[in-house]
Image (cartoon, helix red, strand yellow):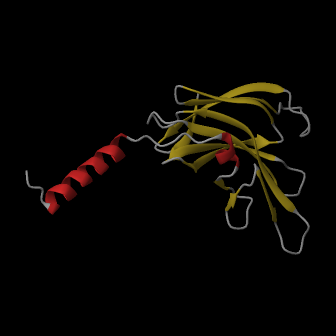
Amino acid sequence: MKRTTAGVILLGASLLVGACATTKPQPFTADAIRNAEYTSPWLAFGYARLSDGIYRERFNPDSPTVIVIRSDLIAMGDLDGDGVTDAAVLLISNPGGSGTFYDLAAVVNDRGIPKHIDTAHLGDRVKVKSISIQSGTIRVEMLAHGPKDPMCCPTVEVTRTYKLDAYKLARVN
């Protein structure tokens, strides 16, 4: 049987395409999430790469103000229905004033790399108890502020749910 160069190349290419088509992205770890890049309205350039869950930046070069974004709570689960594990992350931003802002970040698995795709603001000085993902829905249990609560001390237990809709976090009632 005589093999031609074109036949060998065609066979190699079809094996490569077949292998790529069936290979799922590797699941990412909590460490990958804690070292991923996130967008934030509190940052000078609008984005930050965390290092072990923390990012610090001078908000104003003439001021000692520091922004800290921490990924304290991470939930893993499939958010976009592709069968690959994604994540929901709690980002806490303190731009130096009295406010501490809590945001829910949706992170999808982009060929094994965490990709922050959207954020939902949860509130100023709320207390997030837990984040979970089930059937593509993110569930956030937290204490929010009641009408007479001081900013330091939210007392109203709330559960908020979110889903990805066209790669945007949408609150579900």
Q: Is residue 85 left or right of residue 1?
A: right
Residue located at (56% from left, 29% from top): 137
Q: Quadrant of residue 66?
A: bottom right
Residue located at (8% from left, 55% from top): 2
119 and 77: which one is in front?
77
Residue located at (74% from left, 26% from top): 158
Q: Quick one: which residue is furthest to the front in this view?
A: 1
Against 18, residue 76 (above or below) is above
87 and 39: which one is in front?
87
Q: Quick one: which residue is furthest to the left in this view?
A: 1
Residue located at (84% from left, 41% from top): 125
Against 60, residue 74 (above or below) is above
Against 144, residue 124 (above or below) is below
Where does residue 110 sit, x and y in percent of width and height?
Answer: 50, 48
Q: Quadrant of residue 57?
A: bottom right
63 and 18: which one is in front?
18
**Where is the C terminus found, in terms of image quarters?**
top right
Where does residue 89 sit, x and y in percent of width and height?
Answer: 67, 41
